[in-house]
Structure formats: structure tokens, C-alpha cells
Amino acid sequence: MTIDVTDNLGKSFQYAKDNLVGKWITYVVLFVCALIPLVNLLTLPGFAVRVFRNKFAIGDWVELVIDSVKALIIAVVYLIIPAVVAAVFGVLFGAENIVTIVVSFVVSLLFVLLLIIALIRFAKGSFGDAFQLGAVFTKIASIGWLSYLIAVLVAYIIMWVLGAVCGFLGGIGWLIMALLTPFVLIGFARYYANVYESA
């Protein structure tokens, strides 16, 4: 299955615009949550989960924090293996060895691909659904591995360019990034949800 990345980006950020522009209390709440250490960890993942469910809203903070903690646990579980692989190859071949770099990149990319689907399965189902690897692989296969990979890489490149530009601008860039964070969070969460729902 082919995913129209451009169309998906347009629809996803239109979704973000619809939920933020003119709804400035919502925007300010997200902006403040993103700025405060620990608060961002306990809220932003939960907001992404709500977007995955297509039920984005401010409020019900206990549920939001619980969803955030569950999402963080899922992320830690999925990213343990890439971390272990990188550490082992780093010890065996050296951290800057090409073998270590290539293997670490490939394994990390694979588990990031799995993690995104796992998080959306959690959002749409239950916590346990995130760890049903067979279903995760089946879902990716139905989307199409190549199409899915391209969609994820496009999102990564956009984020990398945005981060690089804001980093180059120094303090003003940091402010721009902070102001854009609510749009980026909601837009890319919807983007990945659309990819998931494409199959």
C-alpha cells in the first residue's frame, strides 16, 4: 500500500491547526506543559495518545498522566534492546567503529518502527496490546514496510531540519521551537495515526 506522505502531512497539520488556532487556552496549556521539565514527560505523551484515539482534549489530568506513564513504559521496553545492542557492539568493536554504528542504527530504526505501532495499538486498545509483537508486525506488513519506512523517515527529516534551523538561530530558535511544539506534537501524532489507519 502506498501512503501519500504530502497529503498526510497536510491533513495532519490541518488537524493540529483546527485544534489549536483560535483555541488559545488549549495552545497555552500545551505550550506550558512542554516547557516544564517532568511535567512534559507526564503530559505530552498522554496528549499524543489522545490524538492517536482522535479524541484530543484538555482535561481529565489523572487519565492523562496515567496514559503518559504507560506510554513511557512502552517506549522504555521497546528501546532497551537497541540500547543493549549498541552497548555490546560498543564494547566489542568500539563506539565509533563502523560496524557498531551501522548495526546500532539498523536495530534502533527497526525498534522505533515497532514502537510507533505499539503506542498506537495501546491508544486504540489496551496496554497489553502494545506488546503483541505478532500483531505489530502484521500491522506494519499491511501498511507496507517500505511505505511505512518512508513515512517515518520523512517525519524524521522534517524534525531534524526544524531542529537544525532553530539550533542555528540560537535563543530565538529555541523560542520558535517552543512556540511550535504544540503544533508539532499534535501534527505528527495525527500523521502517525493516519499512517496506522491507512491499512
Image: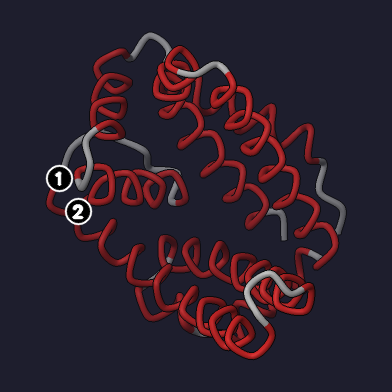
Count of numbered badges drawn on the protein: 2
Q: Amino acid at mark 1?
A: Trp
The vertical placement of 3 against 121, above or below, is above
How many C-alpha atoms fall within 10 Å of the one at disc 2: few (<14), some, or many (≥20)?
some
Q: Amino acid at mark 2?
A: Val
Residue in the picture at 69% in, 27% down:
10
Q: Secondary structure at mark 1?
A: helix
Residue in the picture at 47% in, 50% down:
52
Q: Secondary structure at mark 2?
A: helix
Q: Which sits in the foreground, 139 or 47?
A: 47
Query: Percent x, y for residue 122?
Result: 42, 67
Q: On the rendered structure, is 14 left or right of 178?
A: right
Query: Percent x, y for residue 86?
Result: 59, 78
Q: Quadrant of the C terminus?
A: bottom right
State yes or no: discs 2 and 1 in contact (Cβ < 8 Å).
Answer: yes
Q: Residue 109 appears in which quarter of the rendering? A: bottom right
Q: Residue 133 appears in which quarter of the rendering? A: bottom right
Q: Residue 69 appears in which quarter of the rendering? A: bottom left
Q: On the rendered structure, is 12 left or right of 58?
A: right
Residue in the picture at 15% in, 45% down:
61
Query: Percent x, y for residue 79?
Result: 49, 73
Q: Which sits in the foreground, 22 or 174?
A: 174
Residues at marks 2 and 1, CA–CA distance in whole angstroms: 6 Å
Query: Percent x, y for residue 70?
Result: 29, 67
Residue linked to disc 1: 61
Q: On the rendered structure, is 100 left or right of 175?
A: right
The vertical placement of 149 against 97, above or below, is above
Residue linked to disc 2: 65
How many C-alpha atoms fall within 10 Å of the one at disc 1: few (<14), some, or many (≥20)?
few
Q: Quadrant of the N terminus?
A: bottom right
